[in-house]
Image (cartoon, rainbow, N blue to C red):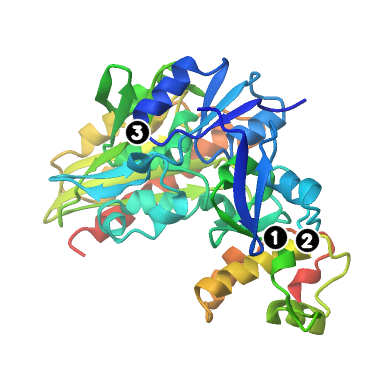
Amino acid sequence: MKKKTITLTVNNQSYTLPIKPGETLASLLRERLHLTGTKIGCEEAECGACTVLVNDEPVLSCVYPAARADGKTVVTVEGLATYVHHVMKLHPIQEAFVEHGAVQCGFCIPGQIMTAFALLKRNPTPPRKKFDLHLKTLCVVVAVTR
Amino acid sequence: MNLWQEYRQPTSISKAIEDLTNAPAPAVLIAGGTDLLLDMKQGRHTPVHTLIDLTGIPELNLIERKIDSLFIGACVPISQIIANPLLEKNAQALLEACNLIAGPQVRNVATLGGNVAHALPAADGTIALVSLDATAEIASPNGVRQMPFLNLFLGPGKSAIDRSKEIIVGFNIPITKSNQASAFKRLMRPQGVALPILNCAVWVEREENRIEDSRIAVGPGGPTPFRATNAENILRGLIYDDILLDQTLKALLEQGSFRTSPRRATSEYRKHILSGLFRDTFNEAWSRTFS
């Protein structure tokens, strides 16, 4: 059967949207929900800048068909900060990136943060070798070595 | 231009086959899509009208023990294969191969079915499945049938699956006994090329110091995934020693076709490194028996 709409939860908010032909999750997030924190870097499943969580698992939104997110829960970098009395409070991972000055151009940072978030969500004290595998979002200015 | 017009998500095998025959053509199956969508984006794929997403079909997402085999659904993500204790015990080569495929985000989406359907002669998951003597379960409008794994491949990128009406449901691999074990190793360029210079998977059955039987797969060792049956025949029933592996290597080099590929390696280099790669992989599998 041909479906006309998809319903998905993004950062705790539910959306029902008409299906667009050929749309990736990255485009849906950026162009329709205006969540432009998710960056499209290489657009060939290599760099990791477009990483978002789908049902708690990190995926590359540039090669993820938007229609497949129907019925699923998505978290983007915008979903990490919380609001207390209308004042934005950054997530501890974001705080840590700020504190250590781990940003130069910043383009890949949403990917860096989302992969770190996914890893720590699953295991709050991951062994060092997991870092090497999980946190390898490409960064051209090499700020990430901090 | 839109890469596809219509996206279907059938929830059963029969509905998927129905979609495949009825949906506006050209209709193409998609599993994880991490290869397919790139091919489409980069203009390496013929135009597609309908994508039929198989990842929502429960049977294709199962890993289960049958009487004397294990079934791995074609749409089980690579990350779940790596984390499965049944497979850790019975399919070491496959686990090692999956542990080398891409990074975490791709592994959460990419599937073994997609790896096999692409029909590349050096796909890591595919080469591991050759050594594990897998059979493929294929669904068509006439029902489900078992197919010897190597019969799936016709040439580089060319699968024997009839794309107009057939679906890979999953793979069956025999349970590994305590005197059997497997291993997988590969050599890669440091960056930029997803396929290995050379990979190798070995399954071995041991009786004290005798090699009862073995299965050796190397990729790329020809236009389709290569199983080194001549080498296996030499080894069968003989006492394990280093000189024996040398003789086997000769047979391996003679039977396989190790050609030059422009972005990965020359033929000479491949033949040169095969010696160490085969030896290491065989020894690894051998040392795992009875452990």
Q: Nearer the viewer, mark 2 or mark 3?
A: 3
- The spot of residue B11 in percent (x, y) is 41, 36
Could you tell me which chain the residue with mark 2 belongs to? A
Mark 2: which amino acid? Cys
- The spot of residue A78 in percent (x, y) is 74, 66
Mark 1: which amino acid? Thr
In this view, the residue in front, B13 or B108, is B13
Residue A31 shown left or right of residue A25 in the figure? right
Query: Pointer 2: what residue?
Result: A108
- Disc 1 crowd rating (10 Å Cα; few below 14, some 14-19, many 20+) is many
Residue A116 shown left or right of residue B185 in the figure? right
- The spot of residue B163 in percent (x, y) is 46, 19
**Label 1 or label 2, whichever comes before in sequence order:** 2
Could you tell me which chain the residue with mark 1 belongs to? A
Mark 3: which amino acid? Val
Could you tell me which chain the residue with mark 3 belongs to? B
Q: Secondary structure at mark 3?
A: strand
- The spot of residue B273 in percent (x, y) is 49, 44
- Contact check, label 1 and label 2, Cβ < 8 Å: yes
Q: Quadrant of the N terminus of chain B?
A: top right
> Which residue shows up at 77% across the image and 65% down it?
A109
- Disc 2 crowd rating (10 Å Cα; few below 14, some 14-19, many 20+) is many
Query: Pointer 3: what residue?
Result: B169
Say whether mark 3 and mark 2 are on the same chain.
Answer: no
**How far apart are labels 2 and 3 at the CA level?**
37 Å
Answer yes or no: is residue A15 visible.
Answer: yes
**How far apart are labels 1 and 2 at the CA level?**
7 Å
- Contact check, label 3 and label 1, Cβ < 8 Å: no
In this view, the residue in front, B140 or B178, is B140
Query: Pointer 1: what residue?
Result: A137
